[in-house]
């Protein structure tokens, strides 16, 4: 298809040789559904132990952009009767995308709030910006909290990208190239992902049973604020947690039957189930949207939105397991059965190839009608499909494969990122692993949850992740239902440093099926009788947000803090 050439941007001349790229289906759907109340931003944080030279960093980031020219794009303006949106390759940035946010109390908090509320414009190349927060007295004050901050943290690089143009893996690849240019070290080989080779797709293409797919997924119950107050709330809230990577038990000499990604999915399902039960909502099937990225992660990685979205049905195969899973202390054997079912479904979905958003998005973006009419149809279809939208988005970058070595600035000690949390879903969970630590971000729409409710939900997620780490492997005795010592609060000295490229934690998916469908659980009937009421109280040290500017907080409230 030929896209008509127009001016490069509003008041911006076209550079010589600038090319045009029609919007892919994912970009167009996102463009149609943009909302000022819930910005479509991707936020990525890299914490470094030292300080960076501003001139060298600005130059290194500029070189990284030139090394990935697909990032240097802006939307070609036009009227609603045109047949297609298009990106224009500019070849160079329209301005300086690096902003030194300064230092002082609250600098990082302000940068995070800006990342959630202010998307880089699509009409300026590149549609991303890099905020640099410097240290005060040797620490990046006042965030992250003292008990999870790596000792001597000196700089935080906060990259914000517009999700219509770029996704989190693309943004991380740009920062990895920036680190290579800044330190002067050549790029190391990046191990590829290992995907299972299975010809049979998951039932219905959604990794679930027919019963689960014919039932509307449950929604995350809103908090106790009056409905008019929630309706007027705008923007997203966010809370970050530094946790150990959950343990994966396996019989001696074998590969764990499930991946860390499967544990995150199960923990998210348990969190939603317990949260809804505590608010009087009946249990129901939880469906999770899971991005799958099949791109290479080296310097040849294609930029843009390159992940495909699949849905995983998290309903237990045995309905009697519901009470066991939603009790105050989930039964380890029931959790193991849920993990085995989840692992089987995700293996099938990762092995199945398909379009990023399915056939429906492809039909809505066929350039037979003007983009204005297609936009009206897309927004109408989104409203009509709202009751069938998945419950939560869970995206896992896995073990960060890049060293992120900034030379005299040091290697990255933590990598956090977050994905949009727009209604009607309203909740996203994002995770990445660095140096043996799991950095988890919960992000929610304030039209669904307030900051206090978001902090309570984060407390439930910590408990659920602890529960899934205790699940026994096949043919082993169930573990005692106690909180794992490995999921204790992070030490003040923070995570160990990552040394060089590492393999993806999902690389073992498909190596061992691990599902024992006929395995009988002799303890199940008695355990079901002892199941506690769902949604019981969680520990007193559940993180809560600031209620007033400058308010003092007890030590345990600093474990996690919302933005």
Image (cartoon, rainbow, N blue to C red):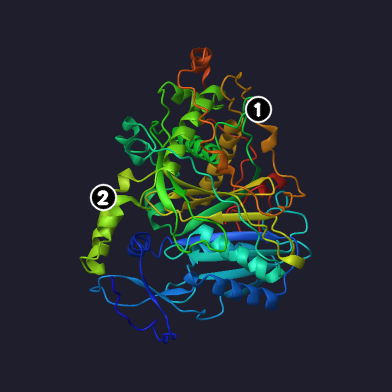
**In this orientation, does residue 312 appear?**
yes
| Residue indicated by mark 1 | 253
Quadrant in the picture for residue 220:
top left
**3D distance between C-alphas at marks 1 and 2:** 50 Å
**Residue lying at the far left of the rendered structure:** 369
- Residue 522 in the image: x percent, y percent? 52, 12
Quadrant in the picture for residue 36:
bottom left
Quadrant in the picture for residue 412:
bottom right
Pick the front one: 365 or 522? 365
Q: Mark 1 or 2 closer to N-term?
A: 1
- Residue 181 in the image: x percent, y percent? 66, 70
Q: Nearer the viewer, mark 1 or mark 2?
A: 1
| Residue indicated by mark 2 | 384
Q: Residues within 10 Å of mark 2 (few under 14, many from 20)?
A: few
Is 264 rendered above or below residue 173? above
Secondary structure state at the residue bearing disc 2: helix
**In this orientation, does residue 127 appear?**
no
């Amino acid at each position: 298809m030929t896209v008509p050439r127009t001016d490069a941007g509003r008041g911006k001349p076209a550079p010589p040789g600038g090319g045009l790229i029609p919007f892919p289906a994912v970009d167009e759907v996102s463009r149609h559904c943009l909302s000022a109340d819930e910005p479509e931003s991707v936020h990525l944080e890299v914490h470094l132990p030292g300080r960076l030279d501003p001139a060298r960093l600005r130059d290194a980031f500029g070189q990284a952009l030139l090394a990935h020219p697909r990032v240097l794009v802006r939307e070609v303006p036009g009227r609603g009767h045109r047949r297609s949106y298009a990106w224009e390759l500019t070849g160079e940035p329209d301005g300086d995308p690096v902003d030194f946010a300064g230092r002082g109390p609250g600098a990082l908090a302000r940068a995070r709030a800006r990342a959630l509320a202010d998307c880089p414009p699509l009409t300026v190349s590149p549609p991303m910006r890099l905020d640099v927060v410097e240290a005060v007295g040797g620490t990046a004050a006042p965030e992250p909290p003292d008990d999870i901050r790596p000792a001597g943290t000196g700089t935080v690089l906060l990259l914000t990208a517009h999700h219509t143009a770029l996704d989190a893996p693309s943004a991380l690849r740009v920062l990895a190239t920036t680190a290579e240019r800044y330190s002067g070290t050549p790029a190391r080989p990046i191990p590829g992902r290992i995907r299972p080779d299975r010809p049979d797709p998951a039932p219905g293409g959604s990794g679930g049973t027919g019963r689960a797919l014919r039932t509307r997924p449950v929604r995350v119950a809103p908090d106790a604020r009056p409905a008019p107050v929630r309706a007027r709330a705008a923007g997203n809230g966010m809370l970050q947690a530094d946790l150990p990577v959950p343990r994966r038990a396996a019989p001696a000499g074998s590969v764990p039957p499930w991946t860390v990604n499967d544990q995150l999915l199960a923990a998210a399902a348990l969190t939603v189930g317990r949260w809804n039960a505590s608010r009087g909502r009946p249990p129901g099937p939880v469906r999770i949207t899971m991005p799958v990225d099949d791109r290479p992660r080296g310097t040849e990685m294609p930029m843009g939105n390159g992940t495909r979205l699949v849905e995983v049905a998290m309903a237990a195969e045995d309905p009697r397991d519901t009470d066991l899973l939603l009790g105050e202390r989930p039964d380890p054997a029931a959790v193991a059965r849920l993990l085995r079912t989840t692992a089987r479904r995700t293996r099938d979905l990762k092995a199945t190839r398909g379009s990023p958003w399915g056939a429906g998005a492809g039909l809505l973006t066929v350039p037979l009608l003007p983009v204005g009419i297609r936009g009206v149809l897309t927004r109408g279809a989104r409203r009509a499909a709202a009751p069938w939208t998945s419950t939560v988005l869970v995206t896992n970058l896995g073990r960060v494969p890049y060293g992120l070595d900034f030379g005299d600035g040091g290697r990255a000690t933590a990598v956090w990122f977050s994905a949009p949390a727009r209604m009607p879903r309203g909740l996203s969970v994002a995770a990445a692993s660095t140096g043996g630590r799991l950095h988890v971000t919960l992000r929610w729409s304030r039209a669904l949850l307030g900051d206090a409710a978001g902090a309570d939900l984060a407390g439930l997620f910590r408990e659920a992740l602890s529960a899934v780490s205790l699940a026994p492997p096949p043919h082993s005795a169930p573990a005692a239902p106690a909180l794992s010592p490995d999921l204790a609060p992070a030490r003040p000295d923070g995570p160990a440093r990552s040394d060089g490229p590492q393999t993806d934690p999902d690389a073992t998916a498909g190596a061992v099926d691990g599902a024992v469908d006929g395995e009988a659980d002799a303890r199940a009937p008695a355990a079901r009788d002892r199941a506690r009421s769902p949604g019981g109280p969680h520990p007193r040290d559940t993180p809560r947000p600031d209620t007033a500017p400058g308010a003092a907080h007890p030590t345990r409230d600093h474990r996690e803090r919302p933005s």
